[in-house]
Amino acid sequence: MSNSKIETTVGGLVLVLAIGFFIYVLNSTNVMNRDDGLNLKASFRSADGITSGTDVRMAGVKIGTVTGMRLDPESFRAEVLFSLRGDLKIPDDSGVAVSQDGLLGGSFVEVIPGGSEFELQEGAEFMDTQGSVSLVSLLLKFVSSGD
């Protein structure tokens, strides 16, 4: 009989830990946070290294995520959709760039704040964009220019 009580207690403890872990995962991935924030977009010549779910950062701090990407069939540019925190007031002359966490790090989207007194509204598009830079092409240019 005491063996059954111990098994029931351990099973209950495992169940509570599993539920706690599940809630932690939902909170850390912002699934339970239904504050949609500010949805913006930008058009890049090259968006290598970023996908849906990629971090959007400002001054090294995560302020949002990439929510979608598509190829514009008319301009052949990558159109990237972002969801940023709703409490931020992003100046309308701000820019975005595809950056990397060092030589071997992953890519992220960096918001470079402007100085305008007007802010970006829901659905607005960043006009100042800088696409990703291919490290391989830079190395090839460096090697080939070293006559």
Image (cartoon, rainbow, N blue to C red):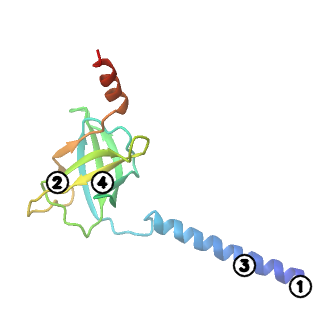
Secondary structure at numbered mark 1: helix
Secondary structure at numbered mark 4: strand
Q: CA distance from mark 4 to mark 1?
A: 56 Å
Q: CA distance from mark 2 to mark 3?
A: 52 Å
Q: Position of residue 43 (x, y in %)?
A: 23, 42
Q: Position of residue 91 (x, y in %)?
A: 14, 60
Secondary structure at numbered mark 3: helix
Looking at numbered disc 2 in the image, what kind of residue is underneath it? Answer: Ser
**Does 146 sit above or below residue 15?**
above
- Label 2 or label 4, whichever lies nearer to me, is 2
Looking at numbered disc 4 in the image, what kind of residue is underneath it? Answer: Phe
Looking at numbered disc 1 in the image, what kind of residue is underneath it? Answer: Ser
* N-terminal-most mark, 2 or 4: 4
Check disc 3 and report the residue beneath it.
12
- Label 1 or label 2, whichever lies nearer to me, is 2
Check disc 4 and report the residue beneath it.
82
Residue 2 marker:
1
Secondary structure at numbered mark 2: loop
Looking at numbered disc 3 in the image, what kind of residue is underneath it? Answer: Gly
* N-terminal-most mark, 1 or 2: 1
Q: Is residue 52 left or right of residue 129?
A: right
Instruction: Give the total of numbered labels.
Output: 4
Residue 94 marker:
2
Q: Quadrant of the N terminus?
A: bottom right
Corner quadrant of residue 123 = bottom left
